[in-house]
Image: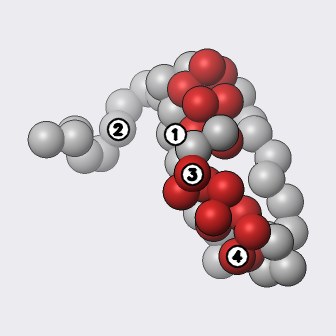
Amino acid sequence: MKVFEIYRDIDAYRLHLESEHFKRYKATTERMVKSLKPIRTDAIALGAKAR
C-alpha cells in the first residue's frame, strides 16, 4: 500500500513533520513504513477541492 500526501510547499511539509499527530504516527508505525521519501512535483490539476 502506498500513501501520497500533497503539501503547499517545503515549509508546510516541514511544519507537518514537527506536528504532534505526525510524531505519534511515526512512533506507532516505524516498523511498518519502509520509506518517507519526499518527491518534488508540480500539480497540474487536482480531482477534488477542499471545502
Relative depth, front residue between 47 and 8: 8
Please give the name of the residue rendered at 81% of the width and 72% of the height, measured from the top-left corner. Answer: 30
Please give the name of the residue rendered at 73% of the width and 75% of the height, measured from the top-left corner. Answer: 29
Q: Quadrant of the N terminus?
A: bottom right
Q: Is residue 46 above or below residue 2?
A: above
Please state which of the two labelled residues, at mark 1 or mark 4, is closer to the viewer. Answer: 4
Q: Secondary structure at mark 4?
A: helix
Hey, which quadrant is residue 46 in on the image? top left
* Colour convention: secondary structure
- Sequence order check: which comes first, mark 1 or mark 4? 1
Q: Is residue 18 left or right of residue 39?
A: left
Q: Amino acid at mark 4?
A: Thr
- Sequence order check: which comes first, mark 3 or mark 4? 3
Q: Are marks 2 and 1 in contact (CB under 8 Å)?
A: yes
Please state which of the two labelled residues, at mark 4 or mark 2, is closer to the viewer. Answer: 4
Q: Which residue is mark 2?
A: 46
- Sequence order check: which comes first, mark 2 or mark 3? 3
Q: Is residue 42 visible?
A: no
For disc 2, the neighbor class at 10 Å (few under 14, some 14 to 19, many from 20) is few
Q: Amino acid at mark 3?
A: Glu
The alpha-carbon separation of the residues under discs 2 and 1 comes to 10 Å
Q: Which label belongs to residue 28? A: 4
Q: Secondary structure at mark 2?
A: loop
Q: Which residue is mark 3?
A: 20
Q: Secondary structure at mark 1?
A: loop
Hey, which quadrant is residue 24 in on the image? bottom right
**Residue 10: percent from left, percent from top:** 65, 22
Q: Are marks 4 and 2 in contact (CB under 8 Å)?
A: no
The alpha-carbon separation of the residues under discs 2 and 3 comes to 27 Å
The alpha-carbon separation of the residues under discs 4 and 2 comes to 30 Å
Q: Are marks 3 and 1 in contact (CB under 8 Å)?
A: no
